[in-house]
Image (cartoon, helix red, strand yellow):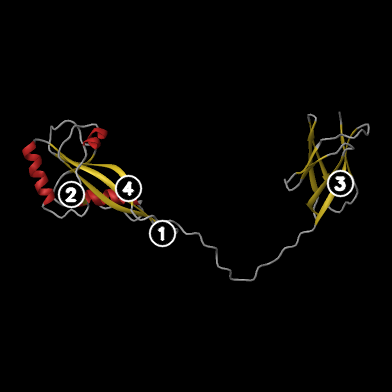
Amino acid sequence: MPLPDEHTGPLVSANAALLHQLAAAGVAVEMSPPPESQDRLRLMVWPVALLPEDVPAQAGNPLRLRVRYVVAVGGPAEAALALWDRLLETEQPYLVPEKVSSSLWQAIGVGQRLGLLFEVPVQFARPVTTAPRVTSLPSLVSISLRRVHGRVVTSGGVPLAGMRVAAADGTSVTHSDTNGHFVLSGVQADQPLRLNVTGRGLRLAAEVAAVSAEPVVITCEI
């Protein structure tokens, strides 16, 4: 089985490394849970757990885990034992010296049989965010700000309280008071200002000139 290319993730690479190691013994390997049927001779590999390393990962260091697999042989008993012989006569660096518990076989959904556990180490590199290197002096941009004030009234001059008055770019928002007055602070002074006025089922738009210092009167037709 070919090893994965350099763009493959750590878990897929770990899986391929184990299958490659097992296949080196001249054994046909299948990636599947052990079936209940023992109809033909085969070696089956199935991942059963992701286990953390005993030492907690430090900030900025790779995350280290172990992928645990159960390996079983299917087929007639005599042929299966011969297959285990061929497998274990070669060095198996991922072999775990623990028995496969009966609860694990039950979780997979098959009866207890000959099997071994293998673990492959993996690590996940965590990207480190760094600020770009400053290669020139910073430039400062100054922006002149102003306050815009005015009133919201009906066509008959009656003040409208509680009307929402907002800069269209979302930089400032306020509400008219009981006399219909409003004040918007911190709006840019060197460009026209577009206002959105909402309330009482109305939705209006108004534009204030960049150099205007006069109070803005917004008339609502009610």
Mark with earlier residue (2, 3): 2
In three-dimensional space, the C-alpha distance between marks 2 and 3, rounded to whole angstroms, equals 80 Å
* Dots 4, 3 in contact, CB < 8 A: no
Left or right: 213 in relation to 92: right
Mark with earlier residue (1, 3): 1
In three-dimensional space, the C-alpha distance between marks 4 and 2, rounded to whole angstroms, equals 24 Å
Residue 1 appears in the rendering:
no
Mark with earlier residue (2, 1): 2
Name the residue located 13 percent from the left edge and 49 percent from the top edge: 87
Left or right: 199 in relation to 108: right
Task: Provide the residue designation for mark 2.
Answer: 23
Task: Provide the residue designation for mark 1.
Answer: 61
Name the residue located 32 percent from the left edge and 46 percent from the top edge: 50
Task: Provide the residue designation for mark 3.
Answer: 149
Q: Amino acid at mark 2?
A: Ala
Q: Residues within 10 Å of mark 4 (few under 14, many from 20)?
A: few
Q: Amino acid at mark 1?
A: Asn
SS label for mark 2: helix
Q: Quadrant of the C terminus?
A: top right
SS label for mark 3: strand
Left or right: 61 in relation to 18: right
Q: Amino acid at mark 4?
A: Leu
Task: Provide the residue designation for mark 4.
Answer: 51
Q: Nearer the viewer, mark 2 or mark 3?
A: 3
Q: Residues within 10 Å of mark 3 (few under 14, many from 20)?
A: some
Q: Amino acid at mark 3?
A: His
